[in-house]
Image (cartoon, rainbow, N blue to C red):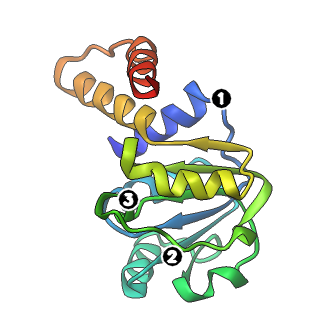
């Protein structure tokens, strides 16, 4: 449900068109697997996967099987990758109080930065996105709500209204 959660949050709630975006996916764990396929299916122009363990990024790219659009890069080479229209953080760095050292050159003028985590775990990446003057900055709260709604639908055949839940949790998070 991760992939559905991300796509619903971005395309339906935030009204973001993912087509034709040069995309950087940071991380290659379980959530990255789900969203990588979704991003390719949503029509991103190029997907660059970068993980601290390069072999895991290579494995994910190989599994997707679209070598014309999906590539990997080494973490140390990020400053040479140019800029992106979409940067998705799926690393666990925020959960372990680690910071990601990312060059500002990754951010294009219209970049959308999205952390799959939310709350305190997303703050480091979101702070970087603000400092990089990202046009759009989102944490994974909407994704979490949408994937829970999808799981509820799978189990009960009823799709709950998610907007009121999103608004309430966002208001509580901001207070």
Can you tell which quarter of the image residue 67 is in?
A: bottom right
Above or below — where is 24 with respect to 67? above
Disc 1 and disc 2: Cα gap in Å?
26 Å
Measured from the top left, where is residue 38 in percent x and y?
48, 50
Question: Can residue 137 be seen by looking at this rendering?
Answer: yes
- To which residue does mark 3 refer? 94
Work out whether mark 1 precedes mark 3 in sequence or the reverse, and give the earlier one: 1
Can you tell which quarter of the image residue 29 is in?
A: bottom left
Question: Can residue 74 be seen by looking at this rendering?
Answer: no
| Residue extending farthest left | 155
Above or below — where is 162 with respect to 126? above
Measured from the top left, where is residue 78 in percent x and y?
63, 80
Measured from the top left, where is residue 160 in percent x and y?
33, 14
**Label 3 secondary element:** helix
- To which residue does mark 2 refer? 50
Measured from the top left, where is residue 138 in percent x and y?
55, 41
Residue at image coords 46%, 26%:
174
Task: Estimate how packed mark 2 is, as few (under 14), some (14 to 19) or many (20 or more) residues with alpha carbons within 10 Å.
Answer: many
* Left or right, residue 58 beside residue 19: left
* Left or right, residue 33 beside residue 61: left
- To which residue does mark 1 refer? 15
- Front: mark 1 or 3: 3
Work out whether mark 1 precedes mark 2 in sequence or the reverse, and give the earlier one: 1
Q: Nearer the viewer, residue 89 or 63?
A: 89
């Amino acid at each position: 449900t991760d992939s559905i959660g991300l796509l619903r949050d971005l395309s339906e709630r935030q009204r973001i068109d993912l087509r034709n975006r040069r995309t950087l996916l940071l991380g290659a764990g379980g959530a990255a697997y789900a969203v990588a396929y979704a991003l390719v299916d949503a029509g991103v122009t190029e997907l660059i996967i970068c993980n601290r363990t390069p072999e895991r990024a290579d494995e994910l790219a190989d599994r997707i099987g679209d070598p014309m659009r999906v590539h990997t890069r080494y973490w140390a080479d990020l400053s040479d990758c140019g800029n992106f229209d979409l940067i998705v953080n799926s690393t666990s760095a925020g959960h372990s109080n680690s910071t990601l050292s990312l060059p500002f050159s990754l951010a294009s003028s219209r970049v959308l930065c999205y952390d799959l985590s939310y709350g305190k775990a997303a703050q480091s990446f979101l702070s970087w996105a603000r400092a990089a003057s990202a046009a759009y900055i989102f944490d994974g709260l909407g994704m979490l709500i949408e994937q829970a709604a999808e799981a509820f639908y799978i189990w009960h055949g009823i799709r709950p209204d998610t907007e009121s839940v999103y608004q309430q949790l966002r208001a509580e998070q901001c207070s």
